[in-house]
Image (cartoon, rainbow, N blue to C red):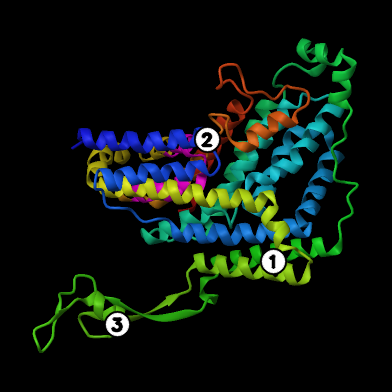
């Protein structure tokens, strides 16, 4: 039964998320801490569990990607992408989102778009294509790729939480669904953007700008490129190490039998307390912790190395190899945008997920009674919940960590949750995400905009089309595969 206190506490959770999103960056996680303090100290709720496994994975992956960037490897990837785009400038509206998407898939963060976006704008302008067309969908694509990356927090968290809830899924199986689904969604968004807005030669606002010689020089004068940059072999070697690390992670995820196994002692579920000779009672859990095997109380079994540990070990090892053999400077990595944005994500997920878990874990019975009938009748409707939460908290990993356990507790089958995974990206809806703001600033033509009424911005249409189509395709693929 819903009570006034329950509603009040939910308002505190949503209020903390809303205020945090207004300040952005580290504030999102920190202000979530205020909401957590109010729930724990003010209302006496039992604290939830912070998502430490996901946080460790993000730290390892971001450290590896940051070291690769410090070595110059990211410049080489951007250079390869630019060569592809400049070779086919007339197809920039389709190729731009594909390049930003696959860069995110490789690196695990969408913040690599900052280097590529000025190049996309430059190519579009020189070809006479309205920059809003490729830029809007390319910015969206850089975030869509997060649910398709084997080292992204959203994917790893989905696999970890799903396995804990008896849905046996691996990272390659997730990618088999998410990658083709998201590519379909992005191509649908690109097709819708192909004739979006007026052509530059027919746009009176743009023509008014270029009539001013100074403004014309500003729009057409610069030449954003990375092709003139000399890429040392050490930078290329860093990319090869990074790609090799990804291949090892995917291999172990696909072939878990290759991983080492360890003997563990577990308490038998439902076992009563053991009464010792002096009358002392000992729980089965205490016996398992002490490493004691007693029939009927504890049992010995073999447990394989968990994938969350595999990712951490491989990523940290790859980072070390880049430092030793590829002239990557750790100080430069720490100062780079990839590492810094990743650490911001750690704080955000830490605060947001801990706040959400505290609230939902204390009201699980009430949530189940309210939502069970709805999700039984329309299980796909959980996608709307994921999307709306993402609009608030600007982190796909945080949405998965915070909401997926609740979805499983409501009895929604794992294949359905896999099918709606693309719906955890909704933070394009309110254009306050750094990649969207940066894209607006990079477009010298002024066609990529945040509208007068906030929601009528350049990312709304491609974002809605991409997420909708991706979710529908992923749902169908998941039902087919599972």
Circle 3 is placed at which residue position? 290
Q: Marks 2 and 3: which is nearer the front?
A: 2
Seen at 72% across and 66% down, the residue is 241
Mark 1 crowdedness (10 Å alpha carbons): few <14, some 14-19, many ≥20: some
Seen at 64% across and 54% down, the residue is 339
**Can residue 91 be found in the magenta stretch?**
no
Position of residue 479 measured from the top left corner of the image (x, y, whole percent): 45, 47
Q: Is residue 153 above or below residue 422?
A: below
Front in this rendered view, residue 96 or 469: 96
Dot placed on the residue nearer the N-terminal end, 2 or 3: 2
Seen at 46% across and 61% down, the residue is 53
| Residue 23 disc label | 2
Magenta stretch: give its range: 386-408
Position of residue 298 measured from the top left corner of the image (x, y, whole percent): 25, 80
126 horizontally vs 448: left or right = right
325 horizontally vs 184: left or right = right
Front in this rendered view, residue 367 or 430: 430
The quadrant in which the N terminus is found is: top left
Circle 1 is placed at which residue position? 244
Q: Secondary structure at mark 2?
A: helix
């Amino acid at each position: 039964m819903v009570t006034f206190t329950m509603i009040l506490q939910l308002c505190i959770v949503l209020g903390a998320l809303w205020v945090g999103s207004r300040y952005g960056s580290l504030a999102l996680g920190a202000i979530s801490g205020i909401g957590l303090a109010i729930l724990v100290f003010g209302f006496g709720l039992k604290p939830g569990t912070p998502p430490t496994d996901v946080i460790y994975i993000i730290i390892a992956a971001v450290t590896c990607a940051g070291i690769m960037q410090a070595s110059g490897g990211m410049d080489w990837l951007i250079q390869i992408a630019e060569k592809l785009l400049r070779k086919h400038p007339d197809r920039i509206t389709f190729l731009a989102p594909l390049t930003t998407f696959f860069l995110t898939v490789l690196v695990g963060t969408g913040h690599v778009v900052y280097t590529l976006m000025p190049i996309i704008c430059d190519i579009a302008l020189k070809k006479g294509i309205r920059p809003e067309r490729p830029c809007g969908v390319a910015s969206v694509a850089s975030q869509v790729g997060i649910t398709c990356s084997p080292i992204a927090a959203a994917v790893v968290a989905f696999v970890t939480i799903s396995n804990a809830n008896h849905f046996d899924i691996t990272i390659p199986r997730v990618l088999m669904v998410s990658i083709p689904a998201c590519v379909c969604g992005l191509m649908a968004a690109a097709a819708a953007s192909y004739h979006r807005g007026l052509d530059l030669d027919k746009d009176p606002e743009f023509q008014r700008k270029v009539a001013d010689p100074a403004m014309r020089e500003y729009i057409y004068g610069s030449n954003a490129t990375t092709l003139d940059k000399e890429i040392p072999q050490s930078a290329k070697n860093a990319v090869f190490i990074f790609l090799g690390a990804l291949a090892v992670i995917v291999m172990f995820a696909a072939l878990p039998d290759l991983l080492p196994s360890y003997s563990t002692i577990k308490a038998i579920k439902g076992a009563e307390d053991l009464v010792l000779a002096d009358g002392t009672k000992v729980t089965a859990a205490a016996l398992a912790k002490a490493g004691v095997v007693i029939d009927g109380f504890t049992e010995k079994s073999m447990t394989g190395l968990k994938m969350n540990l595999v990712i951490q070990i491989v990523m940290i090892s790859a980072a070390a190899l880049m430092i030793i053999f590829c002239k990557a400077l750790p100080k430069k990595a720490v100062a780079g945008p990839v590492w810094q944005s990743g650490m911001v994500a750690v704080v955000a997920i830490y605060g947001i997920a801990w706040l959400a878990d505290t609230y939902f874990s204390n009201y699980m019975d009430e949530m189940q009674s309210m939502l069970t009938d709805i999700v039984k009748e329309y299980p796909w409707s959980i996608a709307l919940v994921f999307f709306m939460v993402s609009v608030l908290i600007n982190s796909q990993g945080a949405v998965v960590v915070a909401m997926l356990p609740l979805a499983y507790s409501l009895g929604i089958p794992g294949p359905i949750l896999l099918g709606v995974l693309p719906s955890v990206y909704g933070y394009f809806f309110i254009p306050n995400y750094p990649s969207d703001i940066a894209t607006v600033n990079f477009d010298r033509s002024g066609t990529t905009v945040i509208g007068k009424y906030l929601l009528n911005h350049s990312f709304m249409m491609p974002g809605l089309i991409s997420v909708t189509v991706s979710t529908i395709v992923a749902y169908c693929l998941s039902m087919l595969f599972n």
